[in-house]
Image (spheres, rainbow, N blue to C red):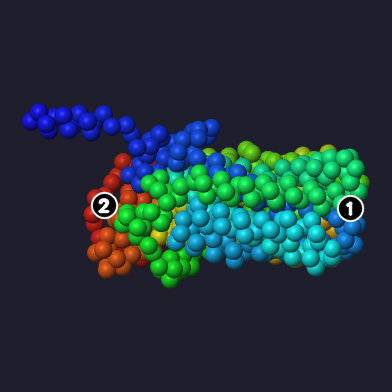
Amino acid sequence: MEVEGQATTVRESQPPKFALPVDSENKATVFPLFSVAAPHMRAFHLSWVSFFACFVSTFAAPPLLPIIRDNLNLTASDIGNAGIASVSGAVFARVAMGTACDLFGPRLASASLILLTAPAVYFTSITSSSTSFLLVRFFTGFSLSTFVSTQFWMSSMFSAPVVGTANGVAGGWGNLGGGATQLIMPLVFGLIRDIGAAKFTAWRVAFFIPALFQTLSAFAVLIFGKDLPDGNFRRLQKSGDKTKDKVSNVFFHGITNYRGWILALTYGYCFGVELTIDNIVAEYFYDRFDLKLHTAGMIAASFGLANIVSRPAGGVLSDVVAKRFGMRGRLWALWIVQTLGGVFCIILGRVGSLGASIVVMIVFSIFVQAACGLTFGVVPFVSRRSLGLISGMTGGGGNVGAVLTQLIFFKGSKYSKETGIMYMGVMIICCTLPICLIYFPQWGGMFCGPSSKSATEEDYYLSEWTSEEKEKGLHLASLKFADNSRRERGRKEDSETKPVDETPSSHV
């Protein structure tokens, strides 16, 4: 008895495994923004900083385009093609990144891609023609796929009550790179030129700054990051604590879930629009209002810098409405905010004064970026088994939207930029409508509730596993996730529970 009592005392006196409160999957249930507690908050800071670095690299060229186009004799068509190339490379890379996260973990997948694309940023300094300029922008753009690993990482580290906030802040602060580079590159260029370099040399030297930043961020992810709260994928798979899934199974359950395709479409007209604006806005203000390069860059920067609050606000809003209205609240909030973004985009294309354009652009940026955060408040719940692939499909949809929008409205001289912006707003409104088709049997959709009171979270998430796989216990992580996502029913039904040992038979 005495020994047994001593053992109990020892167990009770052991310190908690994590610095933050966690759920049954060891995901953090709180989000203390300025904490660096390992592994949850450390993963958060590593993810957004590395994604920020990739954004800076990808959009380092647009704020210096007036200088670059004179040096390389670029035509309007050349600039349009390069802009399209910068976002088209990540279309399929994002889907591949999602699958890589599912199979190898976000840490290794992210760091590997960052290191593979860093040379393209260095090579920008030696481009000598429109073709080489297009190629370096194309290969640099692959780095934007780290967005997928960022969202996967946050969804793996944070529980349902705060996952929208975590995804929104990580994605938003990473996207800040698109605005920050509008300030950074003209400043770096100006400093190098003032030191004594010719302007056609100064812009080339300036590209070593984002290239070095990107490289260092990759090593930080590798050295300090951890895939899951319990450790890295490889170690957990070796110890038997995590099963190694097959590519075919991950791929099948991702592409056959129609909700992922709808979110990919709608994300194409929030994040895709953001990428488009990042590519054109500095040149737009420079040419239309006859501004100085630095002034145009500062105005353009305000669009991307709004991400410091707008995208995180979207993630927070998603979590807040979910507490009261569940998944249906997340869907309604996404539709309303993104539609309003389309309305302000149309207005931006119609106003003709500098002051009004700046004000409308900032309001537009808040809504379109908040919609990005709201989107990834929904994504983590679409699939547990193929979370990375669904994230990749959605993220890839953002790049597809950017490519199509730039091809249709901003390539060549068919439309003026203000007309293209107006039509882009119409596209946002139209492509947001399919959100009303998203329906979860256990939670409902925008216009109707659950299919029946018997529809459960376990039915939905365990339908991704076969009977044989369940017999081997491969479904246990999904079972825990189903239990933790029960709050997506909303406050009304939050108290209703169902035993988690039932064997569901319905399909996703």
Q: Position of residue 347 (x, y in %)?
A: 76, 48
Q: Which residue is mark 1?
A: 200
Q: Is residue 506 left or right of residue 284?
A: left
For this rendering, which residue is in front, 219 or 297?
Answer: 219
Q: Position of residue 124 (x, y in %)?
A: 77, 58
Q: Is residue 3 above or below residue 197?
A: above
Label 1 is placed on what type of residue? Answer: Phe
Residue 290 in view, yes or no: yes
- Marks 1,2: beta carbons within 8 A: no
Q: Secondary structure at mark 1?
A: helix
* Mark 1 or 2, nearer chain start: 1
Which residue is label 2 attached to? Answer: 500
- C-alpha span from label 1 to label 2: 66 Å
**Drawn side of residue 13 relative to residue 147, left or right:** left
For numbered disc 2, what is the local secondary structure?
loop
Find residue 358 and report its horizontal and vertical position in percent.
Answer: 79, 41
Residue 136 on image: x %, y %: 74, 62
Does residue 427 appear in the picture of this structure? no
Eye-nearest disc, 1 or 2? 1
Q: Residue at x 53, y 32 (%)?
A: 34
380 on left or right of 62: left
Q: Residues within 10 Å of mark 2 (few under 14, many from 20)?
A: some
